[in-house]
Amino acid sequence: MAFSLEGRVALVTGSSRGLGRGIALALGKAGAKVVINYFNDRSAADDAMREMKDAGIHAMLVRADASDPDQVADMVHSASEKLGFVDIVVPNATPDQPQKPIEEYDSDFYLQMYEFFVLGPYHLARAALPGMKSRGWGRIVNVTSEVFHCGMPNFSAYVAAKGGQIGWSRSMATELAPSGITVNTVAPGWIPTERHANDPQDALNAYHETIPMGRWGTPKDVGDAVTFFASREASFLTGQTLCVNGGRTPW
């Protein structure tokens, strides 16, 4: 079967809902054992586990703060003990992302974005890399955003952190390639999920009009892209960014 992940173990941070849940479901349906990670919403996490079970996916649930290095290390260790070495990591967890003029941001918020989108992948990679290197195989797939490429006003902290995440991924791709480990990024456009429930309808309508494909993207669309990067068929692809935005890519 193309894109089979049988025998692999995947860990997706922030995977109790939204894009993370779609990614975890896609990886599981391809045959991977999946670690579902959450921090705040246990109800959503339990619901995600039920969905995995109903789909016949072997999964485990771990509560951990994806921005805390000790909790991340413990999560990877626990997953490795119960499911086997973690082969695939997808740093997906995200905090709130308010849009403000630069004068209204403060340095603490900039640091929070950096901690989630640069240090978060760093902590997860460091915890999983010993196992990946020992087997000469691994996949790191970062979830970035089209906003870095498109630019977006009143979103400077988030855009800057996503740029750092892409730069980190490219550096790691060249560093880890000799070890058989690929590092790629998936850059979704605006894909409405639970976190967008209160977004203004006029903003949604305006964005929708700019999507050449004429439809909204879904978590499954992002999950399928991540599954491709995680597969053996993508073994010669590293340091790449795949935009999942229905053709909005202007560069």
Image (cartoon, rainbow, N blue to C red):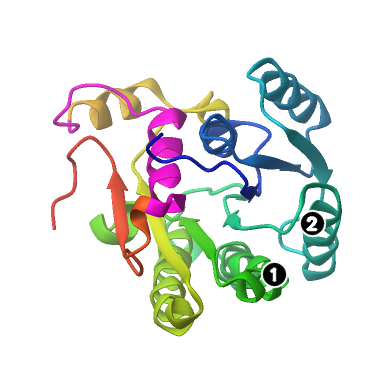
Q: Residue at the far front: name it.
A: 1
Which residue type does callout 1 highlight? Gly
Of residues 125 and 44, the one nearer the viewer is 125
Rendered location of residue 184, percent (x, y): 40, 62
The residue to which callout 1 is attached is 131
Residue plotted at (54% across, 38% down): 27
Q: Secondary structure at mark 2?
A: helix
Rendered location of residue 133, percent (x, y): 61, 76
Q: Is the Cβ of the residue at disc 2 closer than 8 Å to that at disc 1? A: yes
Residue 122 location, quadrant = bottom right
Of residues 64 and 31, the one nearer the viewer is 31
Q: Which quadrant is home to the C terminus? A: bottom left
Q: Secondary structure at mark 1?
A: helix
The residue to which callout 2 is attached is 80
Residue 240 location, quadrant = bottom left
Q: Residues within 10 Å of mark 2 (few under 14, many from 20)?
A: some
Rendered location of residue 119, percent (x, y): 62, 72
